[in-house]
Image (cartoon, helix red, strand yellow):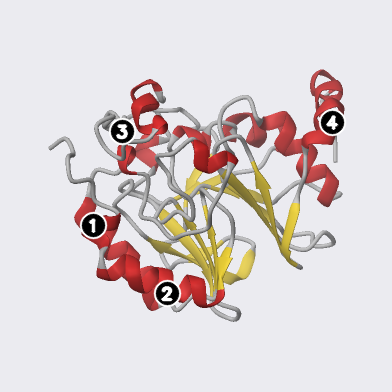
């Protein structure tokens, strides 16, 4: 992998923090400060992709994590959506690796500088992250040079065994990724496996199925429908944008409870109209 001299020393320093957790032989997790980054492909694969990019200024650590696992850069970056904690390092990573960024067509206006997300709602959830949410960036990023629409047929470029599913609600163009052969689901922020409003949950995670982060979710009807779609896939392994992997009976029971009690578990009782 070619290195740019201005980043090489920073990447070397970040190597000790670049802890990559192998979930399966061809799925790896790197937990950034706020959200999760996933790598799809075995270490020997020539065609592998990166899912999401964490917050801004995290590109050195992500590059270091990638270089611990792979000898070559990804073929592409796939964004589940464009919120700041998933797209923050996308531009610098795409530039460093010279690779395209793919997103759903309905998400691209938030990625090419033309649209902004609605402001966060600090009145929901009750946790510290909800209270801090007004300072989270909502301004449109501009990665127009790099971003391309995903194929309309649900195909994931470079990965024949994966497909994406449009799961709006948290954002208009939010997607989840699914592999039918082993029923692995990468859900982005359609659901979470830690309390998405709690900063303490990031330090002391307790695996439980929650809805999407409430302070940034603006269409709860779509969000509920997306959860139902994901549950209907009968996933055996869930990898969310926030929280630890979830599988087995806990996952099955978690989806059943979330569907049955979605309004109580996910939708804030006091939310901004």
**Which residue is the site of mark 2?**
253
Q: Compute the Cα span from label 1 to label 4.
A: 50 Å
Q: Is mark 3 on a helix, strand or loop?
A: loop
Q: Which of marks 4 and 2 is nearer the N terminus?
A: 4
Frontmost of labels 3 and 2 is 2
- The span from disc 2 to disc 1 (Cα, nearest Å) is 16 Å
Task: Choose mark 1 or mark 3, whichever is in front.
Answer: 1
Q: Earlier in the sequence, mark 1 or mark 4?
A: 4
Residues at discs 4 and 2 in contact (Cβ within 8 Å): no
Callouts 1 and 4 close, C-beta under 8 Å: no
Mark 1 highlights which residue? 264
In this rendering, the count of numbered labels is 4
Residue at figure coordinates x 74%, y 54% from the top left: 21
**Residue occupying image coordinates x 68% and y 31%:** 59
Q: In which quarter of the image is the N terminus?
A: top right
Label 3, on which residue?
117
Residue 75 lies, with reference to residue 159, above or below; the image says: above
Task: Point out residue 61 in the picture as x, y percentages from the top left corner.
Answer: 73, 33
Disc assigned to residue 201 = none
- Give yes or no for contact between labels 3 and 2 (Cβ–Cβ under 8 Å): no
Q: Quadrant of residue 204?
A: top right
Location of mark 4 (residue): 3
């Amino acid at each position: 992998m070619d290195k740019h001299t201005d980043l090489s020393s920073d990447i070397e320093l970040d190597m000790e923090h670049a802890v990559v957790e192998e979930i399966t032989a061809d799925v790896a997790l790197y937990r950034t400060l706020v959200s999760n980054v996933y790598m799809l492909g075995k270490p020997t694969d020539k065609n592998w992709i990166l899912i999401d990019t964490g917050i801004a200024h995290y590109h050195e650590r992500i590059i270091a994590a990638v270089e611990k696992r792979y000898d070559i850069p990804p073929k592409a970056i796939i964004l589940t959506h464009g919120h700041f904690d998933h797209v923050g390092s996308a531009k610098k990573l795409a530039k460093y690796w010279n690779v395209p960024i793919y997103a759903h067509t309905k998400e691209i206006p938030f990625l090419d500088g033309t649209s902004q997300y609605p402001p966060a709602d600090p009145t929901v959830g009750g946790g510290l992250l909800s209270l801090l949410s007004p300072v989270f960036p909502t301004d449109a990023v501009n990665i127009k040079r790099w971003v391309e629409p995903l194929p309309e047929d649900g195909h994931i470029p470079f990965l024949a065994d994966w497909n994406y599913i449009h799961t709006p609600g948290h954002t208009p163009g939010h997607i989840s990724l699914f592999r039918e052969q082993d029923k692995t689901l990468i859900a982005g922020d359609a659901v979470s496996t830690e309390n998405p409003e709690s900063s303490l949950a990031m330090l002391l995670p307790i695996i439980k199925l929650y809805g999407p982060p409430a302070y940034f979710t603006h269409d709860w009807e779509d969000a509920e429908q997306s959860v139902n779609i994901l549950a209907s896939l009968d996933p055996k392994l869930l990898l969310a944008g926030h929280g630890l992997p979830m599988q087995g009976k806990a996952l099955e029971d978690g989806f059943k409870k979330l569907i049955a009690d979605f309004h109580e578990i996910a939708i804030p009782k006091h939310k901004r109209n």
